[in-house]
C-alpha cells in the first residue's frame, strides 16, 4: 500500500467500481442469455460457472454480489494477499491491469487443443491413404489452422495491449514459440540421423540451423523421408512470427486514430480483398494442388498478408471488446448456424467462398471462446502446441516403416501425438512459461 493515501485510494475505488459495473453487467446479461439458450435447446439446468484460473473471481453468484456490494480495493488486497496472490495495487499490476486480470474466463485451451487434433486427423487421413471415418465429417468445417490464426489475433493483441513494452512482448513471444520448436527439431534431427539420412553434411547443418531460426523447408536429402515433408505442419510457425511483428505496428496505428472501429474495419476489408486475390493467383494457399506447388505459391502461403484477415478479425474483436457484447458472449449457437449456412451457400472451393467460410469460422471460434465457460478440466495443461509440433514426425515414422492403408494407424498417431504433446508441455514449455514476464491475459 506504499504510495497510496486516502484520496488516491478513493480514486482507485471509483475507477474500479465504474469498470467493474460496466464489465459485469455485460457478463451477467451474456451468461443469463446463454443459460436460457441451453435450457430451451437442451432442456437442462445450467451449471454455475466457476473460475478456471488461480486468481479468478469465482462463481456467477459472487459476480452478482460484486455489483450489489462491491469490495473496496483494500478488501480485495486483503483477500488476495491472504490467498497468496499479488495485490491489485501492488507494483506488479496497475489497477487497470488487475481489473483485466480478474476477467479472463474463456475456452481457448479447449479450442487450441481441438484445432491441433483437427489438423492431426486430416493430415493422417490424407497421408495414410485411408478412408475418412464417418465421424470426421463433423470436423471438416472447423479447419484447425484458421482457428489458430484468429485465436492468436485475439490473445496476442490482448497480451501486448495489457503490457505494451517491446522487450517483454518479444521475450514472451520467443519463449512461447522457440523452446518447444527447438526440442522438436532436436528430436527430429536425432531420428533422421539414426535412420541414415545425411544430417551430418553441409546441407544437413545448414538445414538444421535454418530450422532453429524458423525458416522452415524440407531439404532434398529428406525428400524420401516419410511422405516427403519432414514436418509439413511447421509452415504456420513463420507465419505466426510475422503476425507477432505486426502487433506493435497495429497498436501504434490504433492508438493514434480517433475512430479505431473505422480504421480496423477498413484494414479488415483491405486484407479480405487481398486474401481473395492471392487465392485466385495461387490456389495452393487454400491447399488446392493441381500440380506441384510453385515457389511463388509457397512464398505466398508463407507470407503473413495471405492470412492476415484471420489474425485481424481476432485483433479487431479484442480492440472493440466484442467479447463483452452479445455479438460474441453466449452467441456460439448463433454463429454455428451462420457457419452452417455459409457452407451451404458458399460450398465451392472458390477464393471468395473459402475466405467467407473461414471468416465466419473465425467469429464462431471467438464466440465459442466466450460462451458457456465452465471449470477448465485441462487445469492449465496446454498440450496443443506439442501435439501440433510432433504429429507430423510421428506420421512420417509410421509411413517410413510401411504403415498406412489401415484406419487403426490413425488412432495410433493420435495417441502417440497426445503423449508427445504432454511430454513437450511438461518437460519444455511449462518450464519456459515460468520465465515469462507477467502478462495481463492468460495463455497468450
Image: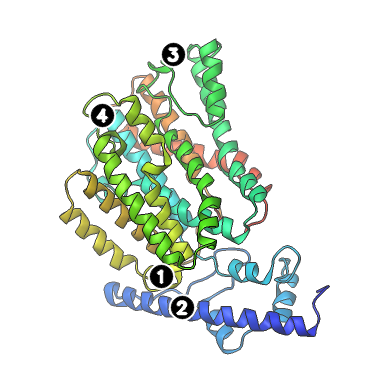
Q: Earlier in the sequence, mark 4 or mark 2?
A: 2
- Structural distance between the alpha carbons of marks 4 and 1: 40 Å
Q: Which residue is mark 2?
A: 26
Residue density around tag 2, few if under 14, some if 14–19, many if 20 or more, within 10 Å:
some
Identify the disc placed on residue 329.
Answer: 1
Q: Earlier in the sequence, mark 3 or mark 4?
A: 4
Looking at the image, is 276 positioned above or below residue 2? above
Assign the N terminus to one quadrant of the image: bottom right
Q: Which residue is mark 3?
A: 221
Residue density around tag 1, few if under 14, some if 14–19, many if 20 or more, within 10 Å:
many
Q: Secondary structure at mark 1?
A: loop
- CB under 8 Å between discs 4 and 1: no
Q: Nearer the viewer, residue 385 or 150?
A: 150
Q: Secondary structure at mark 2?
A: helix
- Indicate which label's residue lies in the foreground, 4 or 1: 1
- Structural distance between the alpha carbons of marks 1 and 2: 9 Å
Asked where in the image residue 175 lies, by quadrant, the reply is top right
Please give the name of the residue rendered at 63% of the width and 58% of the height, measured from the top-left corner.
163
Q: Earlier in the sequence, mark 1 or mark 3?
A: 3
Q: Is residue 383 in sight in this rendering?
A: no
Residue density around tag 3, few if under 14, some if 14–19, many if 20 or more, within 10 Å:
few
Looking at the image, is 177 positioned above or below residue 203? below
- Structural distance between the alpha carbons of marks 1 and 3: 50 Å
Residue density around tag 4, few if under 14, some if 14–19, many if 20 or more, within 10 Å:
some
- CB under 8 Å between discs 1 and 2: yes
- Structural distance between the alpha carbons of marks 4 and 2: 49 Å
Q: Position of residue 198 (x, y in %)?
A: 50, 11
Q: Which residue is mark 4?
A: 129
Amino acid at each position: 500500500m506504499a504510495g497510496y493515501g486516502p484520496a488516491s485510494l478513493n480514486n482507485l475505488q471509483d475507477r474500479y467500481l465504474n469498470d467493474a459495473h460496466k464489465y459485469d453487467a455485460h457478463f451477467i446479461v451474456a451468461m443469463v442469455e446463454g443459460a436460457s439458450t441451453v435450457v430451451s435447446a437442451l432442456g437442462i439446468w445450467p451449471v454455475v460457472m466457476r473460475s478456471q484460473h488461480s486468481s479468478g473471481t469465482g462463481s456467477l453468484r459472487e459476480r452478482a454480489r460484486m455489483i450489489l456490494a462491491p469490495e473496496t480495493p483494500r478488501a480485495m488486497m486483503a483477500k488476495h494477499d491472504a490467498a497468496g496472490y499479488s495485490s491489485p495495487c501492488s507494483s506488479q499490476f496497475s489497477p487497470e491491469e488487475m481489473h483485466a486480470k480478474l476477467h479472463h474466463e474463456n475456452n481457448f485451451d479447449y479450442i487450441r487443443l481441438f484445432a491441433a487434433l483437427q489438423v492431426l486427423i486430416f493430415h493422417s487421413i490424407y497421408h495414410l491413404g485411408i478412408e475418412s471415418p464417418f465421424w470426421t465429417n463433423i470436423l471438416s468445417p472447423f479447419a484447425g489452422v484458421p482457428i489458430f490464426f484468429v485465436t492468436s489475433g485475439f490473445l496476442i493483441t490482448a497480451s501486448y495491449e495489457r503490457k505494451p513494452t517491446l522487450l517483454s512482448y518479444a521475450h514472451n513471444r520467443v519463449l512461447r514459440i522457440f523452446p518447444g520448436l527447438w526440442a522438436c527439431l532436436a528430436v527430429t534431427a536425432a531420428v533422421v540421423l539414426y535412420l541414415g539420412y545425411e544430417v551430418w553434411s553441409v546441407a544437413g547443418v545448414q538445414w538444421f540451423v535454418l530450422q532453429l531460426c524458423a525458416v522452415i523447408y524440407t531439404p532434398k536429402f529428406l525428400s524420401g523421408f516419410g511422405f516427403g515433408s519432414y514436418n509439413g505442419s511447421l509452415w504456420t510457425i513463420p507465419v505466426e512470427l510475422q503476425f507477432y511483428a505486426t502487433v506493435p505496428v497495429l497498436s501504434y496505428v490504433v492508438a493514434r486514430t480517433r475512430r479505431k472501429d473505422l480504421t480496423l474495419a477498413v484494414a479488415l476489408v483491405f486484407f479480405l480483398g487481398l486474401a481473395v486475390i492471392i487465392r485466385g493467383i495461387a490456389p495452393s494457399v487454400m491447399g488446392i494442388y493441381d500440380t506441384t506447388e510453385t515457389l511463388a505459391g509457397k512464398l505466398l502461403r508463407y507470407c503473413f498478408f495471405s492470412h492476415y484477415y484471420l489474425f485481424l478479425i481476432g485483433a479487431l474483436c479484442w480492440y472493440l471488446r466484442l467479447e463483452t457484447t452479445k455479438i460474441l458472449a453466449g452467441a456460439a449457437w448463433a454463429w454455428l448456424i451462420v457457419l452452417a449456412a455459409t457452407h451451404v451457400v458458399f460450398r465451392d472451393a472458390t477464393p471468395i467462398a473459402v475466405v467467407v467460410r473461414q471468416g465466419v469460422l473465425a467469429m464462431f471460434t471467438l464466440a465459442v471462446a466466450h460462451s458457456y465457460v465452465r471449470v477448465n478440466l485441462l487445469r492449465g495443461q496446454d498440450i496443443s502446441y506439442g501435439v501440433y509440433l510432433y504429429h507430423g514426425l510421428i506420421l512420417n515414422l509410421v509411413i517410413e516403416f510401411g504403415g498406412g492403408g489401415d484406419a487403426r494407424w490413425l488412432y495410433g498417431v493420435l495417441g502417440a501425438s497426445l503423449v508427445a504433446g504432454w511430454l513437450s508441455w511438461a518437460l519444455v514449455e511449462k518450464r519456459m512459461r515460468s520465465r515469462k514476464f507477467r502478462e495481463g491475459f492468460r495463455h497468450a
